[in-house]
Amino acid sequence: MAERDLLLVFSDPKPGLEDVYNDWYDRTHLAEIVATPGVVSGRRYELAPVEAPGVAGPAHRHLAVYELDRDPEEIMAEFVGRTVSGEIGNHEALDMSTISVAIWRARGPRLESS
């Protein structure tokens, strides 16, 4: 099986709206994205409260990871169409000024511990 590309979405809620943001993302938005053709799965993560001494922490506290099984440009075009049609929505609790979206492709071998 070929490696799947990953869509990584780093985001945060607006101040004071964390619960509203999490409720919307968990109950609505995640399913909207996974319903898009070419998106195989999706899962949300929140930053664990662990520091790495001497290393700057990430800019975001929330991450959504989606597995893709077709051309990323086709999927991004589908996202745009679904956003325009209202099938995919944004919420006022989402801080759009800090969101970061990128598609990542596997590079090099996959290593696993034995």
Image: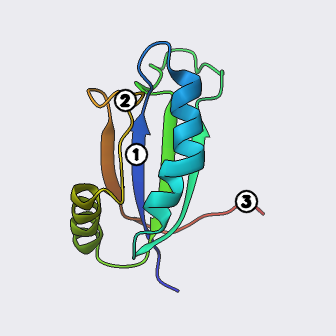
Whether the residues at callouts 1 and 3 have beta carbons within 8 Å, the answer is no
Q: Which residue is mark 3?
A: 113
Residue 76 in percent (x, y) is at 25, 64
- Name the amino acid, label 2: Glu
Q: Secondary structure at mark 2?
A: loop
Residue 103 position (above or below residue 67): above
Q: Is residue 28 visible?
A: yes
- Rendered-image quadrant of the C terminus: bottom right
- Name the amino acid, label 3: Ser
- Label 1, label 3: how far apart the Cα atoms are: 28 Å
Residue shown at 24% from the left, 74% from the top: 74
Residue 29 in percent (x, y) is at 48, 50
Whether the residues at callouts 1 and 2 have beta carbons within 8 Å, the answer is no
Q: Which residue is mark 2?
A: 92
Residue 22 in percent (x, y) is at 57, 34
Judge by depth and name the residue closer to the eye, 89 or 45.
89
Residue 25 position (above or below residue 4): above
Which numbered mark, 1 or 2, is in the foreground of this view?
Answer: 2
Residue with the most extreme front position: 86
Residue 99 image-quadrant placement: top left
- Name the amino acid, label 1: Val
Which numbered mark, 3 or 2, is in the foreground of this view?
Answer: 2
- Label 3, label 2: how far apart the Cα atoms are: 43 Å
Q: Is residue 44 visible?
A: no
Residue 48 image-quadrant placement: top right
Mark 1 or mark 2: whose residue is earlier in sequence:
1
Q: Which residue is mark 1?
A: 9
Mark 1 or mark 3: whose residue is earlier in sequence:
1
Relative to residue 54, is residue 8 drawn left or right?
A: left
Q: Residues within 10 Å of mark 3 (few under 14, many from 20)?
A: few
Mark 3 or mark 2: whose residue is earlier in sequence:
2
Residue with the most extreme bottom position: 1
